[in-house]
Image (tube, grey):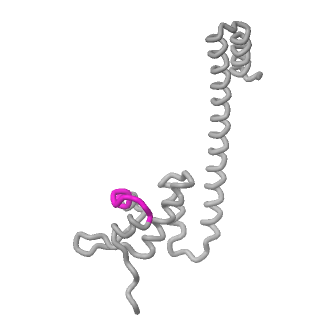
Amino acid sequence: MASEQTYTITELAREFDVTPRAIRFYEDQGLLTPARSGRARVYSKADRTRLRLTLRGKRLGLSLAQIKELIDMYDGVHNSVPQLQRFLRVLAERRAALIQQREDIEAVLGEIDMLERQCAALLGDNVAGAALARAELDRHMRGTG
């Protein structure tokens, strides 16, 4: 049997554009389990895949705990239905959180627009414009605007 391909921490760091420190952190979190050759870490193809999945999960905004749960569910299991169902639930939760964040950002941007109009009106001695902007902000803060 041919020996399995292995990777050094430097090779993985370079391939995935992360620092060796980040890889060691993922190891500390139980996401990677390299073998040792003396003091050097030796990463397997499975470790490489786990690192790729970890980084993908981070891009999606998942917590390391969520990523670990999903990866651990898959390890050694040929029936991935439970993992896929859990992954769909995690994705739905993440989508809902992002939608809420987008709504929050849009609300804040709306408030900024109103405050800018009010400030511009005050700077231009436009008392009527400033009052209108203030009333708009008040309505918005009460949730009626």
Q: Residue at x 54, y 66 (%)?
A: 73
In the displayed structure, 95 sits above or below 83; it is above
Q: Main secondary structure of the magenta part?
A: helix
Query: 134 or 127, which is in the foreground?
Result: 127
In the displayed structure, 131 sits above or below 2; it is above
Rendering quarter of residue 60 = bottom right
Residue sitting at the far bottom? 1
x, y percent for residue 98: 63, 45
Rendering quarter of residue 38 = bottom left
Number of marks present in the image shown: 0
Rendering quarter of residue 48 = bottom left
Q: Is residue 14 left or right of residue 36?
A: right
Q: Dividing the image into 4 quarters, which one contains the C terminus?
A: top right
x, y percent for residue 112: 63, 25
Tell me the magenta residue range.
16-25
Residue sitting at the far left? 38
In the displayed structure, 2 sits above or below 117; it is below
Q: Residue at x 39, y 65 (%)?
A: 14
Q: Is residue 92 left or right of residue 56?
A: right
x, y percent for residue 77: 55, 74
